[in-house]
Amino acid sequence: MITEIIFLMAATFSLNFELCFCMCAQAEYEINGECCPMCSSGNHVYRHCTEDKSTACVPCHHSAFIDAPNGLIDCFSCTVCDPGQGLRVKTPCTRSSDTVCEPLDGYYCTDQHRGGCILAQKHTNCSPGQYIKHKGTAFKDTECAECSDGTFSNGSLLFCQQHSKCEELGLIEIKAGTLSSDAECGTKTPAGLIVGIISFVVIVVAGGVPVIVCLKLTGRLSNVQVRKSVFLCSFNVLNS
């Protein structure tokens, strides 16, 4: 039993010693059992180190980056801010940092990654009968609320407006207001004026028709003249 314990301790010590011996420094990476110096941010490995030569590094090409010391042979592709996803460039990509995207105007971010937006949606449009309770921001959607009775909004207002009170304006209500539209008001027509117009039309029609008929019977008016007279009479009545 004691022998087994001693053997286990020896094996554990040997493994730890091997791991410590093979572990590379913080600024190194391991490749093929060798510890090579890392390339700095914005650069990638062109050729790994050997016993005689250090790591050969080259800058990342256009539209690629690496944002930390590394032992990679390829850089990462820069993120593309797709307008079709509601995005635009906030901070352009460099060799040592990725592109940072932000929402387009009228959009808000729905998914973020490492301080940038990777997906955005268009702000909600409030419906007629609603008002904009809180305007949308780059990180929050528009909040809508319903109008109360006696008020209206077409969906683009920051608050609902009161229906027009036609009587207070000295007018009559032609059409009642709704949650999405104002009341329609019109002018009042005096009753006496209406009676006068009707009486005038009756008098003109009653007096004009016999005259035209009489003239027609005596042959003093042609058919064309009769039609013209009737037309002029009707036109004058309609425009009086």
Image (cartoon, rainbow, N blue to C red):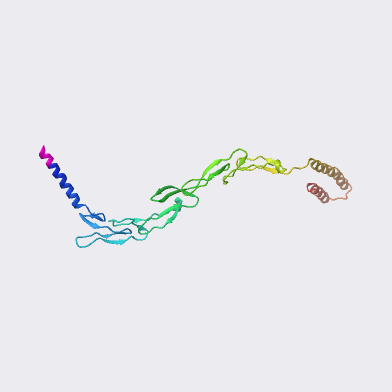
Horizontal side, residue 124 vs residue 177: left or right: left
The quarter in which the N terminus is drawn is top left
- What x and y, as percent, mark residue 209? 85, 44
Rendered image quadrant of residue 33: bottom left
Magenta stretch contains residue 57: no
| Residue at 17% across, 49% down | 17
Residue occupying the far top of the picture: 1
Magenta highlight range: 1-6
Q: Number of labelled discs? A: 0
- What x and y, as percent, mark residue 97? 36, 56
Rendered image quadrant of residue 171: top right
- What x and y, as percent, mark residue 156? 57, 46
- What x and y, as percent, mark residue 161? 61, 43
User: 42 above or below 169?
Assistant: below
Residue occupying the far right of the picture: 218
Residue occupying the far left of the picture: 3
Horizontal side, residue 124 vs residue 28: left or right: right
Horizontal side, residue 84 vs residue 31: left or right: right
| Residue at 71% across, 43% down | 169
Horizontal side, residue 213 vs residue 159: left or right: right
Q: Main secondary structure of the magenta part?
A: helix
